Image: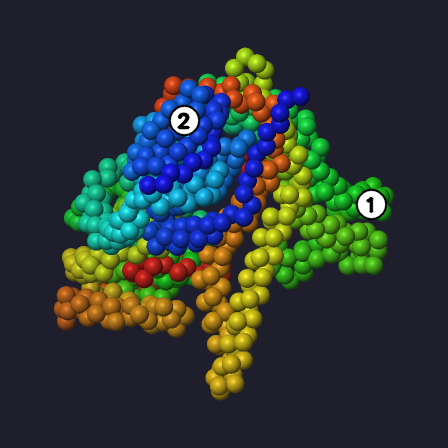
Amino acid sequence: MPSSTASGRWFDGRSAAPHDVTLRLGDRLEITGPGVHRDWNLDDLRAREAQAPLLRLGIAGDPGQVEVVDATFAAILAIRCPDLRKRADTAGGTWRLVVGSLAAGVAILLAVALGLPVAAGLLAPLVPDGVEARLGAAVEGQVLDLMGDPPACADPAGRAVLDRLVARLVSGRGLPSDLAVTVRRHNTANALTLPGARVVVLSELIAKARSADEFAGVLAHELGHVALRDPTRALIQASGTSFLLSLVLGDLTGSTVIVALGQAALSAGYSRDAERAADAYSVATMQAAGGDAAALATMLERIAKDDAETDPDFLRTHPFTRERAATIRAQAGAAASGRRILSEAEWAQLRRICPGAPDKPAPKLRPGRGRRV
Amino acid sequence: MPRTGEIAFDPRLRGLTGLAVVGFLLSLVTFGIYRFWYMTDLRRFFWSRTVVDGSPAEYTGTGRELFLGFLVALALLIVIYVGLFGLAITVPALAPYSAILSFVLLFLVGQFAIYRGRRYRAMRTLWRGIRLGQDGSGLVYAARAALWWTLTLATLGLAYPFMRASLERYRIGHTRVGTSRMASDARGRSLVGPWLLFYAVAFGPVLAVLLALLAANDFTLPTDLILPKPGGKAGDLILNPAYRGSRVATLAIALGVTAGCCLPLALLLVPLYRAREAKVFMNAASLNAASLGPVRLVSTLRARQFYWPYLVYALSLLGFVAVVGLIALLAGLAARAAGGNGFAWAAALGGGLLYLGGALAFAVLHVRIVQARLWAAVATTTDIADADGLNRILAATHGPGSGLNEGLADALDVGGALQIGF
């Protein structure tokens, strides 16, 4: 085999001083110079990354390396050493990496879609009452902030009727003792249930209700969410989702977990199962309290109809509303429609709980679909 | 006469575009996980093409190390987030301050991460087989950065160049090349000039017009100049009609226009300041090789070398948009000739191309033009006075160190793939 020679600079790895050497390429690579003698196997030889025509050669385990600037020598060496440019760190790893990270991404998405609801359901009952109460206070502050701080409605006579109504609905139901139902002036027909047994009724809901039973049905539905701990569960699920998705998207800068609590409470709806369970709870509660359990269905349909006019997005969930209404009516039975939970006089007082409402054009709320009463 | 060594950087950048395109696309399909390997490839490219006194630098970090470091950092961040959350819940009095608290904490962690990331890059850098290193403490660095930032905020930014110089002295002073330690005598006052230029451009004309306005109004503030718009929404303002046509009104409008122009204009000074800073820092850096006196760096960097990459980048992006627009226009005309809805076709094609190609073009051109040219500008304008002193550098016995140092910086998004100067 013909041999090829070149001159280069040897660095021994102990000092930065260069040593002039001669490289002789035969069956092996011989490097010789004053005080330097190496005889390297061509199979072990590796070129470290450098801009051609500079070539940087070394072998594993030897701290020394040699620099050669000789295009012809480099070309011959490339033919003789098949593994010259082989890299230890990425050998065949790119595809494995792509497949692996895709699998990891899909796994995380599956965990978000399937695992989190289960985990949240298991975790929610474990949250201590004290923590949940504080959480509720924090979330309520943020939610009210997002809604533009709607003023509380506290007309004494109306408030007294509401308190009596709540007392009737919760009697013997084992709800948390710190249950707090407040009414706030807002032009969205909705009621929110927040962690820590906090129910916020918006005044437009009372305005839209045509009977006390319709309103009471919605209230009992929200109490169902309280009893089933849905707000805490939704909060855990929403926080977990935003965290896991930020993992997938590679953006962990946002302290999303903390900041987005209020947003999550507003936007994240409950699952359909949770809504059905709250509906069933409402029917049972209204029956026990002696009200018209089917009125909730009427109220749901009316809100859905109004929403469909302003919010095309809502149409998609319309079949679900119809299905819910039918289920509620079936559960309530035919005898339900004759009952009245409040006298007309009491209902009239309750309707006046927000004096002068509604007058303030507050920003229109767009709660999640499931969140709707 | 000591021999002057030079730092060279190959300006042809052969292979970089392919690297960037593949790296960007793979990062896209792997939910960003490939970015650690992409970053590693970029560093290997830039390091190996930076030739110091004839010998190229070598980057020996791996994507796997960066990824593992990221995972460890993630675990740490989860603990921090959960801790902050728990604190806000258990101590309700702190809840209103939790945003500030988390900002301060994450700032400190971020500075710590920047220092540790630099340590990782130093430990993975070799030159002539000699490993670089960085000692010092990330905690000390974070504390210094926090104090300096507080001072900078308190002095309305005037302390900024002094902060930059102080932190640079700490970083460089704890950088080692083999057994030799680097040193920096960077002084903040050498940067005060270009720094004050920001104030002059941003606030000078505004101040001048404001003074003229006051002079025109007999040195009393015309408090009734701006009135709420009658019948308008809250926040709607109009100029008081009583002043219409007066010099005061003209000057008030001029004041608004000046403020609107000068602040963006001041942003154009950023490359100037950065170039001056890089030059000052380079000239201040030296390496104490053995006992024979320091090897100094000499920089001849010009500000225009920092402006040029940004200009080319901006023009490239404009060119990209123009080409997409042209393609959309031609497609629209062709569709119209064929009897279709030309506008819809043009909009769909143009929008699609802009969206799909835009991200790729932005990313690749940024690496190719901005990062590479800035890097080249700093490298090629730097010379080594007394290059023979470099031959006295001896390897240290320390190993490559932990590979987990840089993950935190990535998780917090404070570490760029390539940091000029290192």
Could you classify mark 2 by the number of other residues whose Cα lies within 10 Å: few (under 14), some (14-19), or many (20 or more)? some
The percent coordinates of residue B260 (x first, y second) are 69, 51
Residue B325: quadrant of the picture: bottom right
- Horizontal and vertical percent position of residue A332: 16, 66
Other-residue count near label 1 (Cα within 10 Å), few / some / many at <14 / 14–19 / ≥20 = some
Which residue ends up furthest to the front in the rendered image?
A: A2
Is any atom of residue B383 visible in this view? yes
Residue at mark 2 to residue at mark 1: CA–CA distance: 80 Å
Residue A128 figure quarter: top left
- Is residue A3 positioned above or below A369 on the image? above
Q: Quadrant of the N terminus of chain B?
A: top right
Q: Residue furthest bottom?
A: B339
Question: Of tags 2 and 1, which is closer to the observer?
Answer: 2
Residue B127, horizontal then vertical, whole percent: 46, 29
Q: Chain of mark 1?
A: B
Q: What residue is shown with label 2?
A: A32
- Residue nearer the viewer, B63 or A359: B63
SS at circle 2: strand
Relative placement, left or right, of B89 versus A126 is right
Residue displayed at 55% across by 26% down: B167
What's under tag 2, amino acid-wise? Thr
Residue at (43% x, 24% y) in the render: A33
Q: Chain of mark 2?
A: A
Where is residue B12? Give x, y as percent: 54, 48
Q: Please check whether the numbered discs 2 and 1 fall on a single chain.
A: no
Q: Which mark is residue B212?
A: 1
